[in-house]
Amino acid sequence: MFGTQSTRDISFEFQSQIPNWRPSIYTRRANITVKFQDLYGFTVEGNVDDVNVLNEVREKVRQQGRVWWALEANKGANWYLQPQISSISEGIALKSSLKLSALTNTITLKRLIRKGIPPVLRPKVWFSLSGAAKKRSTVPESYYNDLTKAVEGKVTAATRQIDHDLPRTFPGHPWLDTSEGHATLRRVLVGYSFRDSDVGYCQGLNYVAALLLLVMKTEEDAFWMLAVLLENVLVNDCYTNNLSGCHVEQRVFKDLLAKKCPRIAAHLEALEFDVSLVATEWFLCLFSKSLPSETALRVWDVLFNEGAKVLFHVALAIFKMKEEELLLAHQVGDVINILQKTTHHLFDPEELLTVAFDKIGSMTTNTISKQRKKQEPAVMAELDQRLRRLNSLNEDDK
């Protein structure tokens, strides 16, 4: 598997994993476009300013790595798995001797994760904090192997769509776009399509699963990370046939944009621009297709710890960062171009996450859940009307 090993010694010098890119003096002078591979094998294209940003980001990652190593030395290798407080009632339930330690760990961990999990620690931190390890522990050890063997050779609508999408998933990647990469990704996606027939397979999951494979230690770990994402982290029905959950998320996002960025929302409405034109892909692919991989994975660091509300924070931040530019746009195409160019060149995750959490303001999971419940009836009525219209057209064709 590209960039991963079946076993990994996390005690080696962390800095050796993160190279600095040094464009030649001629490149600096000419300020021309340069290409290179990032930590996960993706080809990055940008100018020298982008390279400088990446070098600064990687220096911060090194510094952050030293903080994590120090905590592991002082608190133990799995200190973040000690009791933590996720709510006031939970805090009251803890014994008093554990309360202070749990609260300290919760605050420390949240702050640390927002600053980024070191790439070498990312697989085990994700697997533990997301609930994937707990989910895997509820089934026999051979579950994944048994599942992949049981479904081998079976053909369904989902497997046919998966086979169609494999070569279109990050084409040109040195591992994913190989026969081995396709076969591994296929096993994960097909396996999950049989695990949850309600979801089956939805386009967008191929990009999510592919990025998980590049991060996690094993194929099976990637499978369980996909499972915990779809079953616990994200909203229900986001990837079912009618995408009802995704439609709800888009309506909630539109409302939040009006509240958090009213000038942008009013301007886009005047242009008759539907934010779902760009945001649907962001939410379905969890930014894996739009942001540079190292930035997308910083978003995922927070997503696995704080939940789906993070997607709203990040999506709003992208609009907020380009507020003045968007307000000058007079065509729908201009808006799309601004947002696409912005996401593709967001090499500094610190900038994005600072806006997402410091400038957008607080949004609790409870608040977003209430917004979802408010939007669900309208979405279901719209989908039902669409289905009736489709059935009527089919009857007319007979």
Image: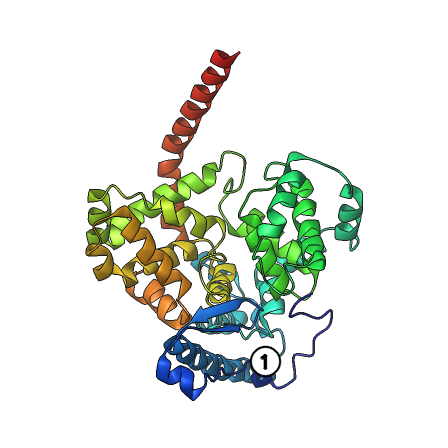
Q: In this view, does 379 lie above or below 168?
A: above
Position of 85 with respect to 164 (left or right) is: left
Q: Residue at x 39, y 38 (%)?
A: 373
Question: Residue 30 location, x and y as percent?
Answer: 36, 81
Q: Quadrant of residue 273?
A: top left
Question: Residue 296 location, x and y as percent?
Answer: 48, 63
Q: Is residue 45 above or below residue 133?
A: below
If the image is split into quadrants, where does the N terminus sit? bottom right
Position of 232 with respect to 337 (left or right) is: right
Q: Which residue is drawn at 78% across and 52% down?
A: 145
The colour scheme applied to this rendered structure is: rainbow
- Front one among 25 and 340: 25
Q: Residue at x 36, y 84 (%)?
A: 29
Residue 110 visible somewhere in the drawing: no
Q: Residues within 10 Å of mark 1 (few under 14, many from 20)?
A: few
Please name the residue that numbered disc 1 is placed on. 17
Question: Residue 262 location, x and y as percent?
Answer: 21, 51
Residue 369 visible somewhere in the drawing: yes
Q: Which amino acid does label 1 sit on?
A: Gln
- Front one among 359 and 57: 57
Mark 1 secondary-structure assignment: helix
Question: Residue 257 location, x and y as percent?
Answer: 29, 50
